[in-house]
Amino acid sequence: MVQNRSLANRKEALKGRSLIIQKIRQFFNEGGYLEVDTPLRIPAPAPESHIDAVPSGNWFLQTSPELCMKRMLAAGYERIFQICRCWREGERGKRHLPEFTMLEWYRLESDYRDLMDDCEALVRFLSCAVHKSAGISYLGKIIELEAPWEKITVEEAFLRYTAMSVEEAEEKDLFDELMVNDIEPNLGVNHPTFIYDYPAARGALARLKKENRKLAERFELYMGGIELANGFSELNDSQEQRERFAKEAEFRASMGKTAYPSPDRFLDELSGMGPAAGIALGVDRLVMLLLDVPEIDGVVSFTNEDL
């Protein structure tokens, strides 16, 4: 009999993963959220510049359950969450898998600051469940989870960790390069870090700030230099969202990327959604952090290469 030693070596991590997912469900159930289950195969993903969907016949495997979940908000569901599989073409590395597990939650009458509070409460709850303490050790460094967590604007991060402003980085097409190489390794080192108020052009599906339309109410959460979550105050202006999608589609076409059909049902229903906030959190990366596993391969049953 041949034993798959790589799979056998993951047994303890997979036990820890199972506990973490059970505790995620407990957290949201006790918080008054309804667990939902939306389709994994959809006719039209959101057109995003740097995220490529995997074709499935004439449809696509979801890159995120976001569009369907926000249609549920528009239909009157107040608090919902989902743990599901997502797919993104060409994403593979120590922290990336082309098929991965996502946690998303959405709440009406909320904004991105409420989601920051949710993140703090969730991660501390899970740490206490796994380690019996509000702190974790990752790759030899202690990350303290007690409040306050660090909050830094994107502009502040560029001024602190790079030699140029956000505006200069955008003009020189260096935003992503500087974020990855100069800023991200410094985020979430001793405490988790929220980096927030992204340039409007990088707002995705986020609402722009009323007091400054050049900024979007979007944040990302980092722990140990790892991007863990991406949250928004949700845009609910369907015309503005159509215009943003059109710009993204134009960019994708200019790069020779796959064209997607317009998600018209989502856009038609979007204006019926009240003020809301939503967030996507990578479950595999969260498990890595909580269990002190250096690579994402160590916290999943099978990678593509194992099949």
Image: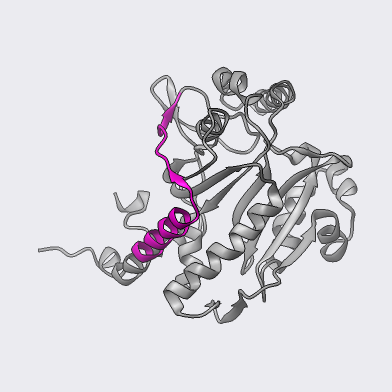
Reply yes or no: does residue 36 show up in magenta. yes
User: Is 266 drawn above or below residue 13 in the view shown?
Assistant: above
Reply yes or no: does residue 26 show up in magenta. yes
Residue projecting furthest to the left: 1
Picture coordinates of residue 211, whole percent (x, y): 89, 42
Q: Residue at x 56, y 21 (%)?
A: 263
- In the picture, residue 151 is in which quadrant? bottom right
Visual colour scheme: one colour
- The quarter of the rendered structure image containing the N terminus is bottom left
Q: Residue at x 61, y 29 (%)?
A: 47
In the image, taking residue 266 as reference, residue 217 lies left or right, namely: right
User: Is 72 drawn above or below residue 282 in the view shown?
Assistant: above
Residue placed most toward the observer, 106 or 178: 106
Q: Residue at x 63, y 75 (%)?
A: 146
Picture coordinates of residue 93, whole percent (x, y): 51, 55
User: Is 244 drawn above or below residue 94 in the view shown?
Assistant: above
- In the picture, residue 221 is in which quadrant? bottom right
Residue placed most toward the observer, 226 or 129: 129
Picture coordinates of residue 147, whole percent (x, y): 67, 73
* Residue 293 visible in this rendered orientation of the protein: no
Residue bounds of the magenta highlight? 17-42
Residue placed most toward the observer, 7 or 102: 102
- In the picture, residue 248 is in which quadrant? top right
* Residue 20 visible in this rendered orientation of the protein: yes
Circle count:
0
Picture coordinates of residue 290, whole percent (x, y): 48, 70
In the image, taking residue 26 as reference, residue 105 lies left or right, namely: right
User: Is 24 drawn above or below residue 237 in the view shown?
Assistant: below
